């Protein structure tokens, strides 16, 4: 008989991971927010340094996906034109603060890029970033001949949870989510470049599954509580926020035994899927705010166009003389002060004659220049319409502001047809109603167009 033992105290299950701030990423068009990404900066990193931050490579990879697979740089939000970080050292930690992500393209920087709103709208890149490939890109282990089902083969190969090392309560977890078969089918040609001959069949292949503890599977990875990301030539678990402080305390930035049989392209698809699972609402808020900002720009542009059209570029003040006639002129253009239009006009009258007498020609020249400027404004406004149209078309609903402003999927095409018709029929555009004004919207639905048949103009 052995003496009684003393029970161990209850394990502290309220593990906390101190955070030292938040990293906010904004769009250049909205440097003051709302941010489309936010990361909690935990006061820890793999080498034990207590300085807090978010791995820069992780931030750039998230931005790459939501910007439609475009690389970029981080600038200070307070100084949007000043570069702060680039791809030179992706293992460094990004300190808490407000930043904007600017896309880098051929010919310069793009401050007006479009955010990809959802995983369904995202197209996988033909080639994933190099750092995601590791050193196992060409590894193709054959399916074990002793097993007939995938789960058993995954269990035999991984043996334990790849994150915790647990033997019990483990499940096969999919990298490309098994519910995304339709998405996989729509991008099958690109996914084949990742190595799979039939990517749809590989949704339930052991090349798309890893072994995880049950609580880290559906309630963990599928809820985007953490990500699998590359860091210093390894794959680590990364917790982007404080939603699971106990798990973050144990497993944040821990190296895992990621199985080499799993295609890294499929891992990158899971990475993108989790991005939209976690930050989908923030992205939609930013896209909506950008559309509202574009709408305000349209209103400002419309105001300038109205002012330009109401300005009178030519014409004099003569009561019955020519276009630039004198105060009592009854003679020809540019007449003298008392109306005979002869060479005895005063210096003021001669100056007026130089600038205004020939007013018909001068006015025509100015009219042409003004029309060219108006045409440029029209094209600029149509470009803004098309940008807003693209945002409206991606949303599954119309807001009250959309209805009141006459915005609906495809409305920019109607606006362009309106403009082209008015350019072809200047007698109609001569009314001078703005393309985007309420009067234009009313008249466009109620105007009776005259047929050109029978000599109508």
Image: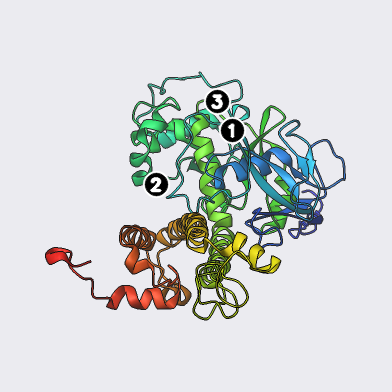
Disc on the earlier residue, 3 or 1: 1
| Quadrant showing the C terminus | bottom left
Q: Pointers 3 and 1 in contact (CB under 8 A)?
A: no
Which color scheme is applied? rainbow
* SS label for mark 3: loop
Disc on the earlier residue, 3 or 2: 2
Q: What's the residue at 45%, 45% (across, down)? A: 177
Determine if residue 242 is in view: yes
Q: 247 above or below 92?
A: below
Judging by the rendered image, the residue that carries numbered circle 1 is 106
Crowding at dot 2, Cα within 10 Å, few <14 / some 14-19 / many 20+, comes out as some
* SS label for mark 2: loop
| Gap in angstroms between the C-alphas marked 3 and 1 | 35 Å
Left or right of residue 259, residue 96 in this image: right
Q: 32 above or below 157?
A: below
Q: What's the residue at 29%, 75% (across, down)? A: 445
Left or right of residue 72, residue 270 in this image: left
The quarter holding residue 63 reads top right
Is residue 384 or residue 138 the one in the foreground?
Answer: 384
Q: Position of residue 256 (x, y in %)?
A: 65, 35
Disc on the earlier residue, 2 or 1: 1
Q: Which mark is residue 260?
A: 3
Crowding at dot 1, Cα within 10 Å, few <14 / some 14-19 / many 20+, comes out as few
Q: Position of residue 202 (x, y in %)?
A: 38, 33
Judging by the rendered image, the residue that carries numbered circle 2 is 180
Q: What's the residue at 47%, 30% (across, down)? A: 126
| Gap in angstroms between the C-alphas marked 2 and 1 | 33 Å
């Amino acid at each position: 008989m052995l003496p009684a033992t003393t029970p161990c105290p209850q394990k502290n299950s309220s593990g906390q991971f101190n955070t030292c701030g938040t990293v906010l990423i904004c769009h250049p068009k909205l440097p003051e927010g709302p941010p489309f990404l936010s990361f909690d900066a935990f006061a820890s990193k793999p080498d034990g340094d207590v300085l807090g931050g978010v791995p820069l490579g992780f931030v750039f990879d998230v931005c790459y996906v939501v910007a439609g697979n475009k690389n970029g740089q981080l600038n200070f939000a307070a100084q949007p034109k000043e570069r702060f970080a680039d791809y030179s050292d992706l293992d460094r930690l990004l300190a808490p603060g407000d930043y904007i992500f600017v896309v880098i393209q051929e010919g310069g920087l793009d401050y007006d890029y479009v955010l990809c709103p959802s995983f369904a709208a995202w197209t996988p890149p033909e080639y994933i970033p190099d750092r995601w490939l590791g050193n196992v890109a060409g590894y193709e282990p054959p399916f074990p001949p002793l097993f007939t089902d995938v789960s058993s083969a995954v269990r035999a190969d991984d043996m334990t949870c790849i994150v915790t090392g647990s033997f019990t309560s483990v499940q096969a977890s999919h990298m490309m989510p098994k519910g995304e078969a339709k998405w996989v089918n729509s991008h099958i040609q690109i996914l084949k470049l990742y190595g799979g001959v039939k990517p749809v069949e590989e949704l339930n292949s052991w090349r798309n599954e890893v072994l995880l503890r049950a609580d880290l599977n559906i309630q963990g990875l599928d809820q985007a509580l953490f990500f699998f990301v590359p860091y210093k030539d390894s794959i680590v678990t990364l917790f982007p926020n404080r939603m699971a402080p106990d798990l973050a305390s144990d497993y944040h930035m821990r190296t895992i035994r990621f199985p080499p049989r799993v295609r890294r392209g499929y891992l990158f698809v899971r990475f993108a899927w989790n991005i939209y699972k976690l930050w989908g609402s923030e992205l939609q808020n930013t896209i909506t705010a950008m559309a509202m900002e574009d709408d305000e720009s349209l209103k400002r542009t419309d105001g300038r166009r109205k002012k330009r059209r109401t300005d009178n570029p030519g014409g004099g003040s003569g009561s019955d003389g020519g276009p630039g006639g004198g105060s009592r002129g009854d003679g020809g253009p540019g007449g003298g002060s008392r109306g005979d239009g002869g060479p005895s006009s005063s210096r003021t009258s001669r100056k007026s004659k130089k600038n205004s007498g020939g007013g018909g020609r001068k006015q025509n020249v100015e009219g042409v220049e003004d029309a060219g400027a108006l045409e440029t404004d029209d094209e600029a406004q149509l470009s803004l319409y098309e940008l807003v149209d693209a945002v409206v078309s991606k949303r599954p609903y119309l807001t009250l502001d959309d209805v009141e402003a006459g915005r609906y999927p495809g409305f920019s095409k109607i606006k362009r047809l309106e403009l082209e018709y008015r350019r072809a029929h200047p007698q109609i555009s001569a009314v001078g109603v703005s393309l985007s004004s309420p009067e234009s919207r009313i008249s466009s639905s109620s105007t009776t167009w005259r047929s050109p048949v029978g000599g109508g103009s």
